[in-house]
Amino acid sequence: MEWTAQISRPLFGPLARDRRPIRPESPTAPNNASSLRRPGTSGRSKAWAAILGLLQAAVLSGCAVGPDFVAPEAPLGAGYAVGKPANITQSAPIAGGGAQRLVSGRDIPGEWWRLFRSKQISALVAEAVTNHPNIAAAEAALRQARETTEADAASFLPSATLSQSVARTQMTTAQFGGFSQSSSSSGPTALLYTLHNSNVAVSFTPDVFGKTMRTVESDFAAAEYQRFQLEATYLALAANVVTAAIADSSYASQIKVTRDLIAAYQKQLDILQKRFELGAVSAADVVSEKALVAQAQATLPPLEKARAQTRNQLMAYLGRFPNDDKGEAIDIEHLHLPRDLPLSLPSNLVRQRPDVLSAEAQLHQASANVGVATANMLPQITLTGSGGSQASNFAQLFLPQTSVYNLAAQLSGQAFDAGKLFHQREAKLAALEQAEAQYRATVISAFQNVANALQAIKHDAETLRAQVAAEKAAAESLDISQAQYLAGSTTYPTVLNAAQTLLSARLNRVQAQAARFSDTAALMQALGGGWWNRLDETPASLPKPTDLVSTLPIAAAIRAEAEEHSRAR
């Protein structure tokens, strides 16, 4: 669908008025990723192609009042950072510590989570998008919007009503102002007769000022909004599953580190206890070591609580109840950190982000609603015709002499309404201005999200490098302090401080490792998630086909009831 005029005012800065109109289409990169869901639809349905053709025919044949919509371009001069950001991050000698390179202009893979090379993550995402109710709800909302569009598009064509009636009537000649001419009667005569009536009435309202076209345009924009809401739901769910699985692995690693250190501290306490019994160390040293063990043990419950809650959240993303947890988990040490990261051009971001495209669809709908409100203020032409047969005997129906017909044309318009329709249109104009502002805000937030993700990738790489060095230094410090304590050249509090420093350093290093994987997922989400490279829609999101039965309401209702009873059985 292509619209040929700009919206009421520029969306981004004074130079926006110089932009050329662009087509409101999604990115058209080839579909290289296989769908994780059940077999779906390829491209747009034939019904939707028919609707688009009908809209174009209406535009060519009629005069549609109201603004014509053009999808806004990316804001001129927008970028992700001041100056040119660094393309390569720092590295660290540890799993997940490799350097990452930003490749400007590279396309986002549809199944971006496969960049981690984890079969477990891929399986979790597949289960989530198949089972989570939010996906089914988004598809149902999309189908509802498309069905509404199909229903309103029927107004482009005439409608016909078939009626069949029989009436038994008694009346008198008095209502005609006459009396019987019979000499035996001095008053009105009663008349008793039966009338059979078979009639077909056809009504058509030509779309002279484009009310129907703008209504269907508004419906179509609403359907596009729901389509991109489905993509946003899919993207958010996939990203949440990945980050939850990474967080779960991080908590598991922190718990393991803490337990290993507690075991080492306990071993040291046992040694000190024996040496105390031999009189080689003081009771203060033993008590201090016990305090260290207790402090380390106190850090375990919060970590275990956090992991348990993360597992519950992961089960919710998978569409499971908490008691359905089967223990699936990933090992952060075995995850692959992608070396090359795609970075979309700023000019492409507004065509990729589902939230931006949803806001654009709302802007489109608000523009079409102004046209509907304007058309409501103008006269409307209605063409009606009816034809059939009337007879006093059923056998005489449809004979030439019993045929009747009626043709009529009506022009009607609101002559006075005390400003009602005027203010309704002004309200739609205010809604259009609101949608414009909300679209600008959404675009700004989109660029902010990408900028934040890029900064996180850069600085978290530096953090991991520093944490690895800090952990190494803390381990060496503990070894040295323990050796000095055994040699009698330092006090035991020095050993305790070194042990506490090592525990904190290792926990911080594990957190920094997980942050690098989470940052990669956040960047993929901020760039739109590559939805244009996969197929997320299924037949559940498409309107039912319009066949011959569906154009006959009574037959369609009978079929629907039969299908409902069949499903119930």
Image (cartoon, grey):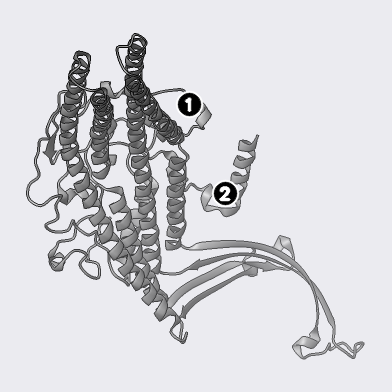
What residue is shown at x 37% (from left), y 31% (from top)? 125
Q: Residues within 10 Å of mark 2 (few under 14, many from 20)?
A: some
Give the x, y percent position of residue 532. 27, 41
Q: What label does residue 142 carry, if any?
A: none
Q: Is 178 above or below relative to 442? A: below
Q: Residues within 10 Å of mark 1 (few under 14, many from 20)?
A: some
Q: Secondary structure at mark 2?
A: helix
Residue 276 can be seen, yes or no: yes
| Mark closest to the chain's N terminus, 2 or 1 | 1
Give the x, y percent position of residue 321. 51, 32
Q: Nearer the viewer, residue 9 or 449?
A: 449
Pointer 2 with pointer 1, Cβ within 8 A? no
Question: Which picture quadrant has residue 509?
Answer: top left
- Which residue type does callout 2 highlight? Ala
Q: For mark 2, what is the residue?
A: 556
Q: Is 467 above or below relative to 233? A: above
The mark tally for this picture is 2
Question: Which picture quadrant has residue 503?
Answer: top left
Question: Which picture quadrant has residue 183?
Answer: bottom right
Give the x, y percent position of residue 305. 44, 32
What residue is shown at x 19% (from left), y 63% (from top)? 12
Quarter containing the C terminus:
top right
- Residue projecting furthest to the left: 83
Give the x, y percent position of residue 263. 35, 17
Q: For mark 1, what is the residue?
A: 325
